[in-house]
Image: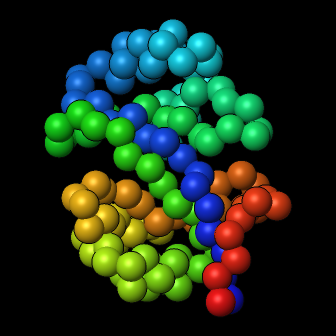
Amino acid sequence: MHRSRLSNFIIDCKTDDLQSAARFWSAALGRSVKQADPAQDNYVGLAMHDDEPIVEVQKVDHASRVHLDIESDDIEAEVKRLESLGAKRVAAIKTWVVMEAPTGQRFCVIRPQRNGQLGPHANIWE
């Protein structure tokens, strides 16, 4: 048995000016830019409420797009569950797995993000 849920929306930006991109999305979504984490120089978070998905702006080398993350307390079990639904494993990177839906969208399966907890609304999978 494992649990998972929608966690993050990542706004992938092909840009040399991540702060400018973060300011745009901050204004567009009405959320302030969080203090940058020096250890994560390719990401800038927006200040979201606890009951909202996490939104981050990410500097990337590929075309700009938005992708989502699914957080799970058992990444491998969640990846296998999604593969059984038709998703493909694209790459394992650090602590997460990049996947592709049967319809072509890329998404990631990641560890729990908010204090290592999935919260009360996570799906429970047998």
Q: Nearer the viewer, residue 52 or 84?
A: 84
| Any part of residue 11 in sight | yes
Point out residue 105 in the picture as x, y percentages from the top left corner.
28, 55
Q: Is residue 14 left or right of residue 41?
A: left
Quarter of the C terminus within the rendering:
bottom right
Q: How is the image coloured?
A: rainbow
Indicate the quadrant where residue 45 lies. Answer: top right
Indicate the quadrant where residue 121 lies. Answer: bottom right
Indicate the quadrant where residue 79 lies. Answer: bottom left
Q: Is residue 54 left or right of residue 90?
A: right
Compared to residue 93, the image places residue 68 above or below, namely above
Q: Is residue 68 left or right of residue 118?
A: left
Compared to residue 108, the image places residue 77 above or below, namely below
User: Which residue appears at 31% of the width and 65% of the height?
Assistant: 101
Point out residue 91 in the picture as x, y percentages from the top left corner.
28, 70
Point out residue 55 in the picture as x, y percentages from the top left corner.
54, 36
User: Which residue appears at 71% of the width and 65% of the height?
Assistant: 122
User: Which residue appears at 47% of the width and 65% of the height?
Assistant: 109
Q: Is residue 32 left or right of residue 44?
A: right
Q: Nearer the viewer, residue 86 or 11?
A: 86
User: Which residue appears at 52% of the width and 85% of the height?
Assistant: 77
| Any part of residue 42 in sight | no
Point out residue 1 in the picture as x, y percentages from the top left corner.
68, 89
